[in-house]
Image (cartoon, rainbow, N blue to C red):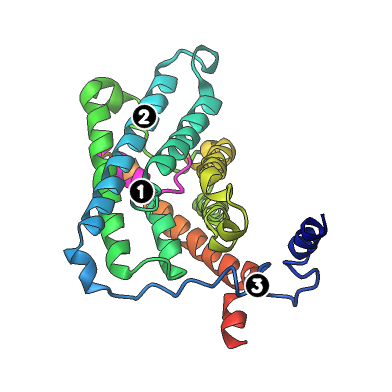
Amino acid sequence: MEGKEEDVKLGANKYSERQPIGTSAQTDKDYKEAPPAPLFEPGELQSWSFWRAGIAEFIATFLFLYITLLTVMGVKRAPNMCASVGIQGIAWAFGGMIFALVYCTAGISGGHINPAVTFGLFLARKLSLTRAVFYIVMQCLGAICGAGVVKGFQPTNYELLGGGANSVAHGYTKGDGLGAEIIGTFVLVYTVFSATDAKRNARDSHVPILAPLPIGFAVFLVHLATIPITGTGINPARSLGAAVIYNREHAWNDMWIFWVGPFIGAALAALYHQIVIRAIPFKSRA
C-alpha cells in the first residue's frame, strides 16, 4: 500500500501548479517544441511521401467540390427552401465533408484541403515553401476537376443555377464580403491550429483523434453565418474551381475577395496562435 500511495503522490505532483505566464503547460521532460520547417527542402522532391501527399490533397479537394457543389445545385433546383436541405444542409455538406476528408488524409498530407490553411501553416513554419506551393497547386487542380464533374452531370442546370460560384450578394459591399471572408477564415484556421497543437497532443491523447470534428464544425458554423453574404468562400481553391468551370463575368468580378480575404484571415490566425496563445517567440528567447 505504501508503494501505491507513493505512486499517487508522484502522479499528482508531476505537473507544477504554478507556471510562468507564456510557458507551456508541460515540463521539458515530456514536451519539446518541434523545430520550424526549412524554407526550402530539396530532398522532398525525391520522396514518394511528398508526391503522395500532393495526390491526397488533389483527391480530397476533388471530392470536396463534387459533394458540396452537388448539394448547392440541389438546393437551387428546388422550388423553395423547404423542399430541399436549405442553407443548413449546404452548411452541413461543407462541414461534414471537411470532417470526413481531414480524418482520411490527416495522416498522409495533414488534411489541408484549403490553400488558406496551407498558407497559415506555412507562416507558422509547419511545412516548407516547396510543399506549401505544391499543395496549393494540387488543391486548385482538384477543385477545378471536382466542379467539372458536377457540370458534366448536369450542364444545363449548372449554367442556369450559377455553378456554385462565389460572389458578394446584393445589399452588401465588397468591403462587407472581404470582412466576412477574413473573419470566417480566421475562425477556421485558428481552429486548425488549436485542434492540431502538438502540445495538446502530447498532453491529451484523445486530441489527435478528435481533431477533424472541431475543424469540420468550424466550417459548418462559418457557412451558416456567411452564406447569405458571399456564399462562403474561406477556401480559395473552392472559389477558383467553381469560377473556372462556370466562367461567367460575375464569377470573376469578386474573385480577389476570395483569395485576399482568406489569406489575410489565415495570416492573422497564425500570428494570434503562435505569438499570443503559444508565445513561441518569447519562449525562444528564454
Tell me the distance, in whole angstroms, between the alpha carbons under discs 3 and 2: 45 Å
Which image quadrant is residue 263 in? Answer: bottom left
Left or right of 224, for residue 127 = left
Left or right of 55, for residue 14 = right
Label 3 vs label 2, nearer the camera: 3
Q: Mark 2 vs mark 1: which is more N-terminal? A: 2
The quarter of the rendered structure image containing the C terminus is bottom right
| Rendered residue at 31%/69% (across/down) | 129
Part of the protein shown in magenta:
232-246
| Rendered residue at 28%/75% (across/down) | 40
Q: Give, as a three-letter code, the residue at label 2.
A: Ile
In what element is the residue under mark 2?
helix
Using the image, determine if residue 235 lies above or below residue 280: above
Q: Residues within 10 Å of mark 1 (few under 14, many from 20)?
A: few
In what element is the residue under mark 3?
loop
| x, y percent for residue 141 | 24, 47
| x, y percent for residue 86 | 52, 22
Residue behind mark 2: 67
| x, y percent for residue 133 | 28, 62
Residue behind mark 3: 27
The quarter of the rendered structure image containing the N terminus is bottom right
Q: Mark 3 vs mark 2: which is more N-terminal? A: 3
Which image quadrant is residue 161 in? Answer: top left
Using the image, determine if residue 190 lies above or below residue 97: below
| Rendered residue at 78%/66% (across/down) | 13
Left or right of 194, for residue 38 = left
Q: Nearer the viewer, residue 138 or 107?
A: 107
Which image quadrant is residue 16 in? Answer: bottom right
Residue behind mark 1: 253
Q: Main secondary structure of the magenta part?
A: helix
